[in-house]
Amino acid sequence: MKPSIYPMQSVYCGAKTRNGGKCRNHSMMNGRCRMHGGKAKSGMDHGRYTEGNFTKEAIASRRKFSELMRMSRELLKGINSK
Ligand SMILES: [Zn+2]
């Protein structure tokens, strides 16, 4: 067993395989093996990163904003109907 620099991380990939088991390849830095996303880059390192409009944070903040807008519309509707 190769020692990991992340103590809580599993040494093996653990991705679900087609025969129902778990992948037993050694994991890379992100916890997956070379065939299950271990080499894939994310965020600004990703080759298709342009402006960050589709990062998890940007999508979450847009979702939050539209939720807020929906709530304020409902509030205004409630005020107007009185
Ligand atoms: Zn794997």
Image (spheres, rainbow, N blue to C red):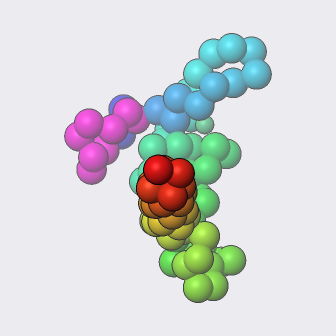
Residue 76 in percent (x, y) is at 48, 60
Q: Which residue lies at the image location 74% right of the left edge and 15% below the top edge?
A: 19
Q: Nearer the viewer, residue 61 or 54?
A: 61
Q: Residue furthest top?
A: 20
For residue 10: magenta? yes
Q: Which residues are magenta?
A: 4-11
Vertical side of 79 occupied by 41: above or below: below
Q: Which residue lies at the image location 63% right of the left edge and 16% below the top edge?
A: 21
Image quarter hosting the N terminus: top left
Residue 25 in percent (x, y) is at 56, 34
For residue 9: magenta? yes
Vertical side of 52 occupied by 75: above or below: above
Asked whether residue 74 is in view, the answer is no
Q: Nearer the viewer, residue 44 or 64?
A: 64
Q: Residue furthest bottom?
A: 51
Residue 39 in percent (x, y) is at 59, 58
Q: Nearer the viewer, residue 20 or 73?
A: 73
Instruction: Place residue 51 in its image quadrant.
Output: bottom right
Q: Which quadrant of the picture is home to ligand 1?
A: top right
Q: Nearer the viewer, residue 49 or 36?
A: 49
Number of on-image labels? 0
Q: Residue furthest front?
A: 82
Q: Which residue lies at the image location 52% right of the left edge and 35% below the top edge?
A: 13
Magenta span: chief secondary structure? loop
Asked whether residue 22 is in view, the answer is yes
Q: Give the side of residue 42 with respect to residue 29, left or right.
A: right
Q: Which residue lies at the image location 27% right of the left edge and 50% below the top edge?
A: 5
Instruction: Place residue 35 in its image quadrant.
Output: top right
Q: Give the side of residue 10 with respect to residue 53, left or right.
A: left
Vertical side of 60 occupied by 49: above or below: below
Q: Give the side of residue 66 with respect to residue 16, left or right.
A: left
Q: Residue furthest left?
A: 7
